[in-house]
């Protein structure tokens, strides 16, 4: 166990030097190799926000779009129906039993089926149809729901990315988590409230006429500016989909902030026609069921560009323009988890963490030196090497260091000496019966090997499970703990053993050391 | 026989009764008093605030938070003067503007600028998921350890190890229940590390027991255990000491956030060291593990 070939020694120290080199990359900005240990949000400050989309309204909304095509299909094929009702997640109607087979066949016709889309991915249809006597129920199939959900999630991520990029935060992370959630990590932002407001808004913009009479085709909405109740037609003139750009501006005359928008060709045509036909009437600009403003139409607007003014501040105008540019979310989004750490707390945590690392490390080193003298020194050298290697590997992996991660490093320092202690204690026992010192060291290392491996594997198992199940900062702990075990084994069985072998082989009588 | 310094097995009975009682008391507390879950597992909002005017007292903050919609509110001093930790039941993100409004309310009522240093807000669905995840992780870790020991040793060892681990986890959590210390995600991490550490300690002794069982065929299990524990004793003590040195330095100097975590770890290291000697090893005697047990199983 004490003999090392030249190649082996060379590769041990090569690995050590390599990891020290990588560890040193953290000291200054380096353009050659751009690798660094990332600081977690709890250390550098920032926000972790978990969003969840609510697809329920979307299901109903999609069903609504099927109503007219289904009615058309039934009329065209002379299938009589009555009691046509749309509820939250299904459509029900009454159809004669003998016509039901025909309906079903039409409903699942594969080619150019505009009502019931075929999903090639799953080889299934979007909608399901059920018959119960003369009642017919149409609802989304499980596959339809999944595909609806996935499409909405994907689109939401895209829109959220646009919104965040537009605000201009540095290095945001936007990831899908599970099938309904989106994880947003924003390092170093100073005002998460503004971002949260931007993320949570569906930003469904519609232009609708204010109508005089109450009725089925209209709804009552509140005007944001002065809480006036308006009766607004449900018919949408144009929606946010027709917008191609929106920018905040100041009004030339009143110097009030407003949002100028540009419409696409189709939107411009529709807008022109409606404004021409309805001069004098009020047009409500509705954002997420709240009327931002409801100006009277004074003249036809045919240029495809207009302004929205609602007595907002410039910041509000900027945010509204941003939301309109990025588009509407397909479904409402809720924040289900938020963790924000201010930058000053992060710095405090780093300081406290590093300070306790230095103290813990020093205490362990002093203890080991007092206990084992020259071999304590060997163990301490391998402990320093261990620390460098940990940082080096964290750098190579570009892992994220969190506050619990720092705790993991300190804990590793405390536990890393265990391997050396196990070995030295074993050697001590061997020395009692063994005359040859070299032989005692040899068998000591050999016999302790199994125990050292067994003991470390158990901690590694805990670290791996923690890595799989842990979230956020706790994952950082699992990473440093796991890496620490590997570097500990390396430093105990290669570095410390090599240094020990140099001492023992040069002092075969054991004059200068004792255990 | 050898230089048997301490007759550990003499205390096995007393220790077992002591362990059993402690576990029982812990279970009673866990069952009737329960754990003080943090926002991670209970849902709600946690705020760490810093107030520039250090004359502001804790009751000023408490009265400034006298808003019915927050639900149950708790305020406590957190580290330095002027730093407070506020917890309330309401999930702050039901309304996007809520946090900025709350900040205004507090600073207006106490008449000083308030800095929100940390905000953690967890919805009810996520918190129950996190709790489930935490429990699964601990259960899985125990199962994995059981499996590892079963492969490396005999089933009797595996049972001894798992009994010791459950002992450690139950007592650690029991102490958290008795002291009403907050249990959050980092405590789950601590519990898992304790499981790893205690296992590590147990394995070292088990390894020696196995080695000695093969070496001496005529000696009783109890005596073998004694010899093995004594042989590994200095290692057990030294490793516990260095680990505790590191943990105490986190506990004292590592800042408020790591306090709970390092406290749980300190408890775990002490209990884990004790359990390797006084819980895991007696189980081997209980199952009458002898040289034959090892050799017989090897034949299969």
Image (tube, grey):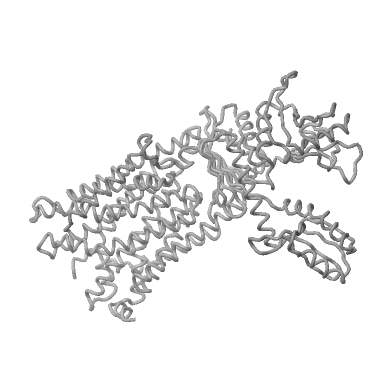
The quarter of the rendered structure image containing the N terminus of chain A is bottom left
Q: Is residue B276 above or below residue A173?
A: below
**What residue lies at 28% left-to-right and 44% top-to-bottom?**
A363
**Nearer to me, A16 or A372:** A16
Q: Is residue B208 left or right of residue A259?
A: left
Q: Is residue A256 left or right of residue A42?
A: right
Q: Is residue A276 above or below residue A53?
A: above
Q: Quadrant of residue A350?
A: top left
**Count of numbered circles on the image:** 0
Can residue B139 be seen in this snapshot?
yes
Q: Horizontal and vertical percent for residue A93?
A: 85, 62
Q: Quadrant of residue B109?
A: top right
Q: Is residue B267 left or right of residue A130?
A: left
**Nearer to me, A9 or A300:** A300
Q: Horizontal and vertical percent for residue A18?
A: 29, 46
Q: Horizontal and vertical percent for residue A10?
A: 21, 51
Can residue B76 be seen in this snapshot?
no
């Amino acid at each position: 166990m004490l003999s090392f070939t030249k190649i082996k020694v060379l590769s041990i120290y090569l690995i050590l030097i390599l990891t020290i080199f990588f560890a040193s990359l953290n000291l200054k900005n380096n353009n050659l190799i751009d690798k660094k240990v990332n600081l977690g949000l709890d250390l550098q400050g920032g926000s972790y926000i978990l969003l969840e989309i609510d697809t329920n309204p979307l299901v109903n909304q999609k069903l609504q779009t099927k109503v007219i095509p289904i009615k058309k299909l039934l009329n065209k094929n002379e299938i009589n129906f009555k009691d046509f009702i749309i509820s939250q997640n299904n459509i029900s109607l009454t159809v004669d039993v003998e016509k039901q087979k025909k309906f079903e066949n039409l409903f699942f016709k594969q080619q150019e089926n505009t009502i019931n889309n075929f999903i090639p991915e799953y080889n299934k249809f979007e909608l399901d149809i059920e018959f119960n006597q003369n009642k017919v129920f149409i609802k989304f199939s499980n596959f339809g729901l999944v595909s609806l959900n996935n499409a909405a999630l994907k689109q939401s991520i895209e829109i959220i990315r646009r919104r965040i990029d537009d605000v201009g935060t540095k290095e945001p992370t936007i990831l899908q988590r599970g099938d309904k959630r989106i994880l947003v990590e924003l390092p170093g932002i100073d005002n998460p409230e503004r971002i949260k407001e931007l993320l949570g808004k569906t930003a469904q913009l519609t232009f609708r006429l204010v109508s005089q009479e109450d009725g089925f085709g209209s709804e009552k909405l509140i005007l944001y500016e002065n809480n006036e109740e308006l009766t607004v037609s449900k018919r949408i003139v144009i929606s946010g989909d027709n917008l191609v750009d929106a920018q905040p501006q100041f009004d030339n005359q009143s110097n009030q902030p407003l949002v100028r928008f540009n419409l696409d060709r189709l939107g411009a045509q529709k807008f022109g026609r409606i404004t021409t036909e309805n001069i004098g009437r009020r047009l409500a600009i509705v954002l997420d069921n709240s009327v931002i403003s409801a100006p009277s139409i004074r003249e036809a607007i045919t240029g495809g560009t207009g302004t929205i003014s609602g007595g907002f501040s410039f910041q509000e105008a900027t945010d509204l323009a941003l939301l309109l540019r990025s588009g509407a979310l397909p479904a409402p989004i809720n924040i289900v988890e938020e963790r924000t750490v201010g930058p000053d707390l992060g710095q405090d945590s780093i300081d406290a963490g590093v300070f306790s690392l230095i103290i813990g490390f020093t205490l362990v080193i002093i203890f080991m030196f007092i206990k084992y003298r020259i071999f304590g020194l060997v163990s301490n050298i391998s402990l320093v090497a261990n620390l460098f290697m940990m940082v080096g590997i964290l750098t190579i992996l570009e892992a994220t260091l969190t506050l619990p991660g720092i705790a993991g490093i300190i804990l590793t320092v405390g536990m890393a000496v265990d391997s050396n202690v196990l070995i030295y204690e074993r050697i001590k026992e061997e020395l009692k019966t063994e005359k040859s010192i070299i032989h005692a060291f040899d068998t000591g290392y050999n016999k302790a090997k199994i125990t050292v491996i067994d003991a470390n594997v158990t901690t590694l198992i805990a670290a791996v499970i923690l890595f799989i199940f842990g979230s956020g900062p706790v994952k950082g702990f699992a990473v440093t703990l796991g890496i620490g075990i590997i570097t500990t084994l390396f430093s105990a069985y290669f570095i410390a053993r090599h240094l020990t072998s140099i001492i023992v082989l040069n002092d075969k009588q054991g004059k200068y050391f004792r255990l | 026989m050898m230089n048997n310094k301490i007759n550990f097995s003499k205390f096995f009975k007393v220790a077992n009764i002591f362990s059993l009682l402690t576990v029982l008391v812990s279970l009673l507390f866990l069952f009737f008093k329960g754990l003080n879950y943090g926002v991670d597992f209970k849902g709600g909002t946690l705020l760490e605030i810093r107030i520039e005017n250090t004359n502001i007292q804790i009751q000023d903050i408490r009265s400034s938070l006298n808003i019915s919609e927050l639900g149950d509110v708790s305020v406590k001093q957190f580290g330095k003067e002027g730093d407070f930790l506020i917890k309330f039941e309401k999930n702050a993100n039901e309304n996007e503007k809520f946090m900025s409004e709350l900040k205004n309310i507090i600073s207006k009522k106490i008449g000083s600028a308030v800095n929100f240093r940390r905000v953690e807000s967890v919805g009810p669905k996520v918190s129950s998921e996190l709790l489930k995840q935490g429990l699964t992780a601990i259960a899985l870790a125990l199962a994995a350890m059981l499996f590892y020991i079963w492969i490396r040793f005999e089933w009797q060892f595996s049972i001894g190890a798992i009994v010791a681990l459950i002992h450690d986890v139950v007592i650690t959590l029991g102490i958290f229940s008795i002291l009403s210390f907050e249990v959050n995600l980092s405590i789950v991490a601590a519990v898992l590390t304790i499981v790893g550490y205690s296992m590590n300690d147990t394995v070292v002794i088990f390894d020696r027991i196995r080695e000695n069982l093969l070496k001496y065929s005529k000696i009783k299990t109890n005596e073998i255990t004694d010899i093995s524990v004594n042989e590994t004793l200095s290692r057990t003590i030294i490793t516990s000491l260095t680990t505790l040195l590191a943990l105490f330095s986190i506990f004292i100097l590592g800042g408020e956030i790591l306090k709970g975590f390092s406290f749980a770890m300190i408890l775990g290291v002490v209990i884990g060291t004790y359990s390797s000697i006084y819980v895991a090893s007696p189980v081997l005697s209980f199952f009458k593990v002898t040289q034959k047990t090892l050799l017989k199983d090897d034949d299969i």
